Amino acid sequence: MAAAGARLALAMEPGTIDNLSILYQSSDFIVVNKHWDLRIDSKMWYETLTLQSQLKHRFPELADPDTYYGFRFCHQLDFSTSGALCVALNKAAAGSAYKCFKERLSRMTISYAIGKNTSEGMTHMMCIEGTEGCENPKPCQSELMVLEHGSYSGDPVTKVLLQPLTGRTHQLRVHCSAIGHPIVGDFTYSHRQDSNPYRMMLHAYYLRIPTGKELIEVCAPDPFVTTMDSNWVPQRVTQRLEDVIQQLKDKGTQKEEEEESREAAGEEEAGGEGRREETEEQRARCEQWLAEWALE
């Protein structure tokens, strides 16, 4: 019991400039295990501790002077979310990662369009289409797979695996709240009711980015286990996390092989003219995405 308490105390410790955990590193990419309650970047003078500052402290020689912050993030994780986050070390790598996220791999599917909340006092939030003050809603899809039923601090909870099929701000948090099951510890989307847990229980566990040059595939250790947090008491397993992840891996491999076969067939039909060019719309989206990290 003492050991479990020590592990929980360690998990509850705030991030520091030098406690950056590296899950994967190559000449083009770094994948970190982002700490909970840590912004990836900030323009506020008082927010000196960010993932960007951790990266600059650990890898000063890898910072890119042509970007505003120094490093290009291939995707986003909220301030309160922990887990695997991919960093591109150059513009070409960022572009190749973008193309992978552009066509995400696809059991309950949640399909609510999400927009910006313009209501007074809620402009920091997102909301689903039909909500008063919802502006510019866009179609969004998330898949939810139930892993375990149990309790947290005596309250009934369910451990799930969420897979975003699109990439809207706060998407997973908004979708869970919309179906009446907000994420444990999400004070914002639980209507300011859930303030007891020490953190929001959302963690990026598995990341797979099959760029043309390399396959990035990492798992960030699961923090939501009894040995790390004794408040979580599992009672019934629906499906094992490892089994579901293996299914996703197999699905990803199958999709990549099918795409390679189609590309090869396309090259043969075109008489060796090469891969199909991107459309102007696809190229514009990619350039817009990359421009977000350009030096201002």
Image: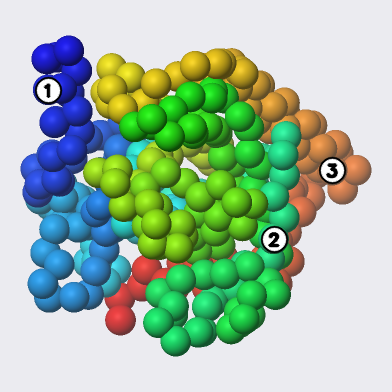
Dots 1 and 3: beta carbons under 8 Å? no
Earlier residue among tags 1 and 3: 1
Earlier residue among tags 3 and 2: 2
Mark 1 belongs to which amino acid?
A: Ala
Helix, strand or loop status at disc 1: helix
Outermost residue on the right side: it is: 269
Residue identified by numbered label 3: 266
Asked whether the viewer can see residue 73, the reply is no
Residue drawn where x is 68% and y is 72% of the image: 129
Tell me: 17 left or right of 192: left
- Seen in the picture, residue 76 relative to 146 is either above or below; the reply is below
Residue drawn where x is 44% and y is 78% of the image: 122
Q: Counting other residues with Cα less than 10 Å from the Cα at mark 1, is it few (<14), some (14-19), or many (20 or more)?
A: few
Position in image of residue 290 (x %, y %): 46, 67
Helix, strand or loop status at disc 3: helix
Q: Quadrant of the N terminus?
A: top left
Earlier residue among tags 2 and 1: 1
Residue identified by numbered label 2: 112
Q: Counting other residues with Cα less than 10 Å from the Cα at mark 2, is it few (<14), some (14-19), or many (20 or more)?
A: many
Residue 167, picture quadrant: bottom right
Residue identified by numbered label 1: 6
- Seen in the picture, residue 131 relative to 272 is either above or below; the reply is below
Q: CA distance from mark 1 to mark 3?
A: 58 Å
Q: CA distance from mark 2 to mark 1?
A: 41 Å
- Seen in the picture, residue 33 relative to 67 is either above or below; the reply is above
Position in image of residue 274 (x %, y %): 74, 48
Residue drawn where x is 18% and y is 75% of the image: 44
Q: CA distance from mark 3 to mark 2?
A: 36 Å
Mark 3 belongs to which amino acid?
A: Gly
Tell me: 55 left or right of 164: left
Residue 222, picture quadrant: top left
